[in-house]
């Protein structure tokens, strides 16, 4: 990244469909008020499952964004992704036309893709035979389709990609889009993550590997990041999308700027399929490298939107990683997990959490970590418990970590 002059990159639009609100405004209001989006599963009968709770998106109408025929040919994760992308473009007041289409691209990540259509079509195959499977099964199922369909429905003909790095996918997508603009390969990018994996098979799989919370008697308090009584993550669904734009391009059209993106790094633990390396060494390197990429010192960081999954391993290791990367300054910054309200969107989590981070900078308010009743002795940072906090944020980080050992940190600052 030293052989050319890097373009400056700003955020000019946001889109969000989440368990606590189906627009960016509703989502932000939900975050700062500590709204809880976790309840009993209604998408299917989960009574036979060990885990029966999730953060479902409620009252979402894809027909507000898409024609009826188009909706029928999309898995729910793509409906979320395309709809949130349209929200973000409208928020940025960015019109894609013949003159700029080739300079506007899409990178949208998903950890799982269209697992619901896969499960549904497996049932069709078993009960009615192979010749009754839908011709739309494959294009509805594959994980890149949210990115592809977003381009189709917006006309964006620039760089197009899909990151599939488990729970780091949304953040990788934003980081990769950032690099494309920095390098002059695009003037603007539609980027983020989406997921819709609250399905019988997906739920059973995560439960089998003991990743989920089984607090079925108390769903409101099931997701409790950094709390000593946490017992696993709670699945969520939805999409979070940013419009990243080259600074001069944004200024030339009078765009409103939420903040500037200044750093991105990714590392790998190279340790275990599902567990982070003890001590958080890989995550700490991601934070350190992202700060180096941004030209920022630890002392300049004000806020971290943590990965904060509410699993025993993640929360303690992420705390250690933050302390390793930031030293004594770690005790002087605010850290919060918005997953406490939304649940864990898997590949979509980096998207909605980047939106939360950018809105926190723009609105000078830090979302809380709810349900933090009994802090774990190993988790000894300022996690902004229960109530949002008014505070000027100069520099903020957003962390995402995924199965396979993927670690991503994004760096944003006030413009």
Image (cartoon, helix red, strand yellow):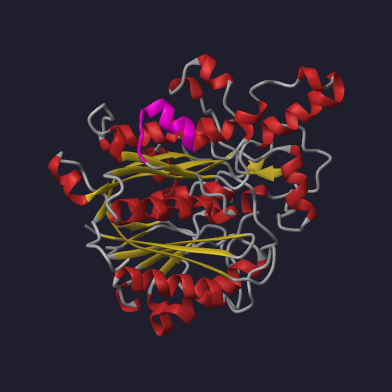
Residue 102: x percent and y percent? Answer: 30, 35
Residue at image point 41% right, 32% down = 151
Please state the extent of the stretch shown in magenta in the rendering.
147-158
Q: Quadrant of residue 126?
A: top right
Front one among 295 and 224 = 295
Q: Measured along the vertical axis of the image, is residue 24 above or below residue 224?
A: above
Does residue 29 appear anywhere in the picture? no
Direction from residue 83 to residue 237 in the image, left or right: right
Q: Describe residue 251's horizontal placement relative to residue 41 as left or right.
A: left
- Image quadrant in which you'd find residue 270: bottom right
| The one of 379 and 307 positioned closer to us in this rendering | 307
Tell me what residue is drawn at x 29 percent, y 56 percent.
Answer: 182
Q: Split into 4 quadrants, where in the image is the N terminus?
A: bottom left
Image location (x, y in percent) of residue 365 = 33, 57
Task: Count numbered badges in the picture.
Answer: 0
| Residue displayed at 26% across by 44% down | 187
């Amino acid at each position: 990244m030293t052989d050319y002059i890097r373009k400056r990159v700003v955020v000019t639009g946001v889109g969000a469909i989440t368990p606590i609100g189906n627009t960016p405004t509703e989502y932000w209001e939900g975050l700062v008020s500590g709204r809880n989006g976790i309840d009993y599963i209604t998408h299917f009968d989960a009574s036979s499952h060990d885990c029966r709770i999730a953060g479902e998106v409620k009252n979402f109408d894809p027909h507000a964004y898409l024609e009826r025929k188009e909706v029928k040919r999309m898995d729910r994760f793509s409906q979320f992704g395309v709809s949130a992308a349209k929200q973000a473009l409208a928020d940025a007041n960015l019109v894609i036309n013949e003159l700029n289409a080739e300079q506007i691209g899409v990178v949208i990540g998903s950890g799982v893709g269209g697992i619901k259509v896969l499960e549904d079509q497996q049932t069709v195959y078993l009960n009615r035979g192979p010749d009754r499977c839908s011709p739309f099964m494959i294009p509805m199922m594959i994980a890149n389709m949210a990115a592809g369909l977003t381009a189709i429905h917006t006309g964006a003909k620039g760089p197009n990609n899909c990151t599939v790095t488990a729970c780091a996918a949304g953040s990788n997508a934003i980081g990769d889009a950032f690099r494309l603009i920095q390098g002059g390969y695009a003037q603007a990018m539609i980027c983020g993550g989406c997921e819709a994996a609250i399905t019988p098979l997906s739920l059973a799989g995560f439960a089998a590997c003991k990743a989920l919370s089984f607090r079925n008697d108390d769903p409101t308090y099931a997701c409790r990041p950094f709390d000593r009584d946490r017992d696993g993550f709670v699945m969520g669904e939805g999409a979070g999308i940013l419009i990243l734009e080259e600074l001069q391009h944004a200024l030339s059209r009078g765009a409103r700027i939420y903040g500037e993106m200044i750093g991105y790094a990714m590392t790998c633990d190279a340790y275990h399929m599902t567990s982070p390396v003890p001590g958080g060494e890989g995550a700490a390197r991601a934070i350190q490298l992202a700060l180096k990429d941004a030209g920022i010192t630890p002392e300049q960081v004000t806020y971290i939107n943590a990965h904060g999954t509410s699993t025993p391993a993640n929360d303690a290791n992420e705390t250690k990683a933050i302390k390793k990367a930031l030293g004594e300054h770690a005790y002087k910054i605010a850290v919060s997990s918005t997953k406490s309200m939304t649940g864990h969107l898997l590949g979509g989590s980096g998207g909605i959490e980047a939106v939360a981070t950018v809105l926190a900078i723009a609105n000078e308010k830090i979302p809380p970590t709810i349900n933090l009743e009994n802090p774990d002795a190993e988790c000894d940072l300022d996690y902004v418990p229960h109530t949002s906090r008014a505070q000027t944020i100069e520099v903020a980080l957003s962390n995402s970590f995924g199965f396979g050992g993927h670690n991503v940190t994004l760096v944003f600052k006030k413009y």
